[in-house]
C-alpha cells in the first residue's frame, strides 16, 4: 500500500515489486499502477517461482520477473536491459523515419504518439511494447511476422516466458483492433503471426 501511494506522489523511472507484501500484494499493486501508467517499466523480484506466478506477472504487465535468491549484478543488468527495451527507439532507416502513421483498416496508427485511432472514437493509448509489436505487424501486413524476429526485436530474447508475454500483448492488440471486423491478427502455426487487413484496395 505504501509503495503504491509513493508511486502516485512521485515520478519514477522504473518499479521493482515483490509479490508477497503486507496489506497489498505485488500483483494487485502492479495492476493498479498499470491502470494509471501503462509505460513505466516494472520488474517483479520475488521468491514466488511457480510457472503460474511468472505468467501472471507478465499477464498483468511486468517487463521482467526475477526469482530470489538473486545476484545484485544480475538485477542491475536486468534493470539496464528493461530500461533499454522500454526506452523510445529511433527508427532504424530513413524510410521508417518518414512513416509517421500506418493505416490498418479503418484504424490510423501513430507510432510516435503511441496511439491508435478509429473514426471519431477516443484514441487508444498504447504501451511501448504494444507500439513496437504493432509496428512490426504493420510492416509485415498481410504477411507472416516470424515469432523469433518479434521476440528479439521487442523483448531482446526468445525464451519461454517472453514468448508467453508476447502472446498476452497479441491478445491486447486484437482487442484494440476489434472494432473493424475486416482486420484481424491470426496465428500462423509454428511460425508467428499475421496482421490481416481485408480493407486493402
Image (cartoon, rainbow, N blue to C red):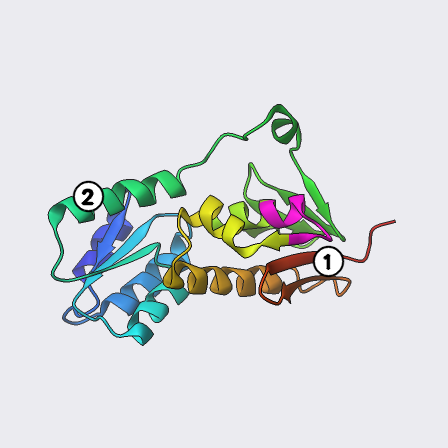
> Could you tell me which quadrant the N terminus lies in?
bottom left
Question: Relative to residue 34, is residue 87 depicted above or below?
Answer: above
Query: Whole-Å distance between the Cαs marked 2 and 1?
Result: 40 Å
Q: Secondary structure at mark 2?
A: helix
**Residue with the mark numbered 1:** 196
Residue 62: % across, % down: 34, 58
Does residue 127 appear in the picture of this structure?
Answer: no
- Could you tell which of marks 2 and 1 lies nearer the N-terminus? 2
Residue at 26% of width from left, 47% of height from top? 78
Q: Residue 191 placed where, x, y %? A: 59, 60
Q: Position of residue 94 (x, y in %)?
A: 62, 24
* Image disc number at residue 76: 2
Residue at the extreme front of the image, as rendered: 190
Q: Nearer the viewer, residue 55 or 118?
A: 55
Judged left or right of residue 157, residue 121 is: right
The reply to whether the magenta stretch includes residue 28 is no
Query: Residue 138 magenta-drawn?
Result: yes
Residue, far right? 201
In the rendered image of this protein, does residue 112 appear above or below residue 36?
above
- Residue 123's label in the rendered image is none
Amino acid at each position: 500500500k505504501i509503495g503504491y501511494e509513493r508511486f502516485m506522489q512521485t515520478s519514477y523511472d522504473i518499479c521493482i515489486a515483490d509479490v508477497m507484501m503486507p496489506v497489498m500484494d505485488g500483483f494487485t499493486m502492479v495492476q493498479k499502477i498499470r491502470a494509471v501508467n501503462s509505460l513505466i517499466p516494472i520488474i517483479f523480484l520475488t521468491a514466488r517461482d511457480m510457472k503460474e506466478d511468472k505468467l501472471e506477472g507478465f499477464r498483468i504487465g511486468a517487463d521482467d520477473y526475477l526469482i530470489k535468491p538473486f545476484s545484485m549484478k544480475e538485477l542491475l543488468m536486468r534493470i539496464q536491459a528493461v530500461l533499454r527495451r522500454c526506452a523510445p527507439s529511433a527508427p532504424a532507416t530513413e524510410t521508417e523515419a518518414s512513416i509517421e502513421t500506418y493505416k490498418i483498416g479503418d484504424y490510423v496508427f501513430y507510432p510516435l504518439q503511441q496511439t491508435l485511432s478509429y473514426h471519431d472514437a477516443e484514441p487508444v493509448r498504447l504501451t511501448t511494447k504494444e507500439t513496437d509489436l504493432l509496428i512490426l505487424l504493420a510492416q509485415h501486413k498481410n504477411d507472416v511476422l516470424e515469432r523469433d524476429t518479434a521476440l528479439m526485436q521487442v523483448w531482446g530474447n526468445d525464451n519461454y516466458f517472453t514468448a508467453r508475454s508476447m502472446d498476452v500483448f497479441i491478445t491486447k492488440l486484437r482487442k484494440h483492433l476489434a472494432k473493424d471486423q475486416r482486420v484481424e491478427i491470426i496465428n500462423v502455426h509454428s511460425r508467428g503471426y499475421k496482421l490481416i487487413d481485408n480493407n486493402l484496395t
